[in-house]
Image (cartoon, coloured by chain):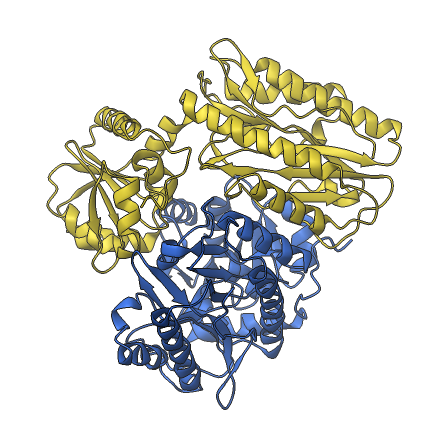
Chain colours: A blue, B yellow
Amino acid sequence: MLYWKAAGDMDPAIYATRIDRVRAAIGRKRIDALLVTHLPNVLYLSGFSGDSGYLLVEPQRATLFTDGRFTVQAGEEAPGAKLVLQRGSLPATVGKHLARTKGIVGYSPSQLSLLTWHALRQAAGATLRWRAAEGIVEALRVVKSPQEIAEIRQAGKVVCEVAREVIGLVRPGVRELDLAAEIGYRLRRKGATGESFAAIVAAGPRSALPHARPTARRIGKNELVVLDLGAILRRYCSDLTRTVYVGSVPARVRRWYRAVKEAQGAALDALKPGVLAGDVDRAARRVLERYKLGRYFVHSTGHGIGLEIHEAPRLGRGQGTPLEAGTVVTIEPGVYIEGVGGIRIEDDAWVTPNGSELLTTLGRDLLEL
Amino acid sequence: MLYWKAAGDMDPAIYATRIDRVRAAIGRKRIDALLVTHLPNVLYLSGFSGDSGYLLVEPQRATLFTDGRFTVQAGEEAPGAKLVLQRGSLPATVGKHLARTKGIVGYSPSQLSLLTWHALRQAAGATLRWRAAEGIVEALRVVKSPQEIAEIRQAGKVVCEVAREVIGLVRPGVRELDLAAEIGYRLRRKGATGESFAAIVAAGPRSALPHARPTARRIGKNELVVLDLGAILRRYCSDLTRTVYVGSVPARVRRWYRAVKEAQGAALDALKPGVLAGDVDRAARRVLERYKLGRYFVHSTGHGIGLEIHEAPRLGRGQGTPLEAGTVVTIEPGVYIEGVGGIRIEDDAWVTPNGSELLTTLGRDLLEL
């Protein structure tokens, strides 16, 4: 029985292609094998979605190491990888396996705890040649296939539907927590396996906190309300923010909103193949500076999105990475005025061969509720 | 404004006491300062619940390092700690600060990535004396205060209410995913800030998978259904599993259920101050062995629960840790018969001065739905 098979699973052939791309990438760095310890990378390269496992990519094979809880799942999800069940700890098992390796083994220092690293090295023995190789798989994941873009588009569709519904529930007296509960519930009812992050519902002065968590605070009259939500649908994430106003919008809030919306438009206009990530950020920032709101924009303009809610590239100040067609990013400028409120508008877009296209299409006009 | 204050927040004096206990614990290991990098430990020792931060416990002060997003929150939540905002990366900031330290600095190798470790050491300079000190704060967290036990009891009450309600929705044709959505929604409506883990709803042969994730599969007639759910209420976790049967229970399933229930009772009877963690596990395992079901019990009998859903101690085979009064654990034996189904019954209990008491009190009789 295919217990884990999700409708959106990739054609198994895709994994062989991705692993070949890993081999080419490490070959250019004169590394013979790559130990993949970050689960989203293991999923990307093998299809295995269990809660514990490492993938070892060698020239002639890929080996998935996991434990007995995941035997059936590994066989079904990752038929292309040789399965090795751990005896003792995962690092000790993998280290022992590596002891026979002659070539140079790459690893990602940000994706290994110091404890795991010691255990791996001890089991592998002193003669094994290790080489730090950060971001190999992450770099491959930046450019999405058409199927991946279709998955994110679908996750974007669901999140837009839910945002529209939940905005309809915003009114004075409703608690932030209750709206967050509605978001999670409605996403799952529409087929999401989960939220790509704990939804933010932040009203009044709390909307000025970019990382607010929903509280039992009740929404009042004449308040801004920021709703930031995301769906995981068939493994891929979406991310959307809308800001609404409860009451009749004062002139200064209308002006702030217009500035953020224009900033988002400018960033989307800048988004195309070859543009530097930092230049997309600058496009948004310049608009806000023109409105004298630059100092209230306290974060980056966006980030990559895919199997993880935050992945490469980062659209931040001075980022020199040129963007390639197939890259999927959020575009989410905002202004945050302490003690008063905040406004953020966020959509997901992909870099097309000629420009960019939105993957979330909910209207962005300021709503007075 | 107290944006983050949760009703269940601790009296600020508690943090000073906890930090003094850290100082005593590291003093016994001749360590002068402890760098705390695991966020639940930072929360436990300072009250700070932000998404990024380290706490440095020194003899005369505790310093919280975080970034500008959390300035207001840190001031409100952790008034007892000196606040230092990072410039550049968190490890570089902390490392630079540590460069002036003369004593030995303890750290937890399982709670630092290799990359972070390199950055810390580089910024701190070659003369700083580091010493690995695993599990210092975790050991203090094992024994809960009466207030902490009250919080977990409250989280247990909410999870029991929701389990009762959602069991009422189990019927043929309902999808596992829909029941999982109901769980999340109802927990939040009752004041939970979230689920302590993604709820498991696994029916039919999928119930034989201890780590099943809910799917779009519809529940059929004559199936076991395992529901495993947890609430985070005012920062503390609860964890509960019930197994029900859709249809008229066959004799062998009734026997399995009786065995698991008896095993859980035996473990609860064994739970008291001074008992070894492994002996609680053995009490459950022996009952299942008596029923010739020992080989179908493929995991440990339980785990500690508190600020994290899995914490010390582990109630597993041969664990030699004696349990102290105030320890809160899950007791969750199960049997899993591949291709057929599984049964697990899980409750939370605390070790009282004389024995143990359940913190989850939902009935455990086998329900035929």
Q: Nearer the viewer, residue A126 or B212?
A: B212
Left or right of B76 on screen, residue A34: right
Q: Is residue A93 above or below residue A322?
A: above
Judging depth in this view, the residue of A365 and B276 nearest the camera is A365
- From the top left corner, tell me how far across and down residue A177 is, in percent: 51, 48
Q: Is residue B212 visible?
A: no
Residue farthest along the top direction in this orientation: B354
Q: Relative to B97, is B353 above or below?
A: above
Residue drawn at (65%, 28%), measured in percent from left and top?
B333
Q: Is residue B158 left or right of residue B149?
A: right
Name the residue at the bottom extreme: A354
Q: Residue furthest front?
A: A248
Q: Is residue A342 visible?
A: yes
Residue under the point 50% across and 74% down: A364
When the figure is inspected, residue B354 is found, relative to residue B262, above or below; the finding is above
Measured as percent of width and height from the top left, residue B151 is found at 47, 28
How many marks are shown on the rendered structure?
A: 0
Where is residue A290? Give x, y as percent: 27, 81
**Image location of residue A108, percent across then percent down:** 39, 60
Residue A207 is left or right of residue A232, and the answer is left
| Residue A21 horizontal side relative to residue A14, left or right | left
